[in-house]
Each structure stands twice: as structure tokens, then as C-alpha cells.
Image (cartoon, rainbow, N blue to C red):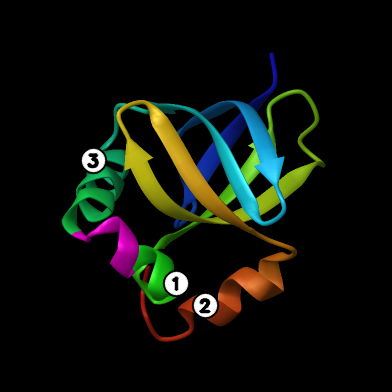
């Protein structure tokens, strides 16, 4: 099983398990961590319509995904859609690319 520890704003918010890629799309089994930051993330993901989130990346949540077995291997992604226990993300090639989406937006 392949696991990634997800951090948002420097705090762990959950685990993405067995992710698979299709070009920029990254999807996997999602388990929220029991923390205030994770609750906020879940609420933000449920506030906007999925189409709004797909059309405007500034409405998403930027995550750093660190491989649980090799902490030097990271993925950067925008959380797009939460459907029950599946999280759909838009993968970004670098931390710098991720920051471009969020300058001045606070997510």
C-alpha cells in the first residue's frame, strides 16, 4: 500500500492512500486526521460546487503530500473534490508552482 501524509498550512490533515495519476489528476482513498485544521479543510471542500473548484484553482486547498515510506519524495497538489472517502487533486509540478495559485489568497 502506498501512503502520502498530507499537510496544509504546515499541519497534517490526513492520509492519501493508494493514489493513482491520470496526467494532472491525482486521486486516492482519503482519511482525515482528527484535528481542527482537518475539520476546516473538510468544510472548505464542501462549501463550493465541484465545477467552481475546477474552474478557479484559487478556490482549492494546497497540499504537500509526503510519501510515508520516503520523506524525501513529495507531491504538490490542489485539493479539488471530496467524494465520500475519495479525494481528487490537481497535481502541480513543484512547491513554487503551488505557491503561484495562492499568492494573496490565504488557502
Stretch in magenta: 48-52
Mark 3 to mark 1 CA distance (whole Å): 20 Å
Residue 49 forms part of the magenta stretch: yes
Residue visible at 69% across and 13% down?
Answer: 1
Where residue 38 sits, quadrant-wise, is top left
User: In the image, residue 75 lies at what x, y percent?
Assistant: 70, 49
Q: Tell how many labels.
A: 3
User: In the image, residue 97 lies at what x, y percent?
Assistant: 67, 74
Seen from this angle, which residue lies furthest top?
1
**Main SS of the magenta segment?**
helix
Mark 1 sits on what residue?
Answer: 57
Does the CB distance between marks 3 and 1 fall below 8 Å?
Answer: no
Q: Earlier in the sequence, mark 1 or mark 2?
A: 1
Dot in front, 1 or 2: 1
Dot in front, 3 or 1: 1
Residue 56 forms part of the magenta stretch: no
Does the CB distance between marks 1 and 2 fall below 8 Å?
Answer: yes
Mark 2 sits on what residue?
Answer: 101
Depth order, front residue of 53/74 = 53
Mark 3 to mark 2 CA distance (whole Å): 22 Å
Element class at badge 2: helix
Looking at the image, residue 67 lies above or below residue 102 = above
Amino acid at each position: 500500500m502506498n501512503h502520502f501524509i498530507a499537510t496544509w498550512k504546515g499541519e497534517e490533515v490526513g492520509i492519501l492512500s493508494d493514489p493513482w495519476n491520470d496526467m494532472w489528476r491525482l486521486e486516492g482513498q482519503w482519511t482525515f486526521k482528527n484535528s481542527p485544521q482537518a475539520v476546516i479543510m473538510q468544510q472548505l471542500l464542501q462549501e463550493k460546487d465541484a465545477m467552481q473548484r475546477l474552474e478557479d484553482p484559487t478556490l482549492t486547498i494546497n497540499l504537500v503530500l509526503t510519501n510515508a515510506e520516503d520523506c524525501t519524495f513529495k507531491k504538490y497538489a490542489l485539493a479539488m473534490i471530496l467524494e465520500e472517502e475519495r479525494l481528487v487533486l490537481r497535481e502541480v509540478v513543484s512547491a513554487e508552482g503551488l505557491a503561484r495559485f495562492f499568492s494573496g489568497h490565504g488557502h
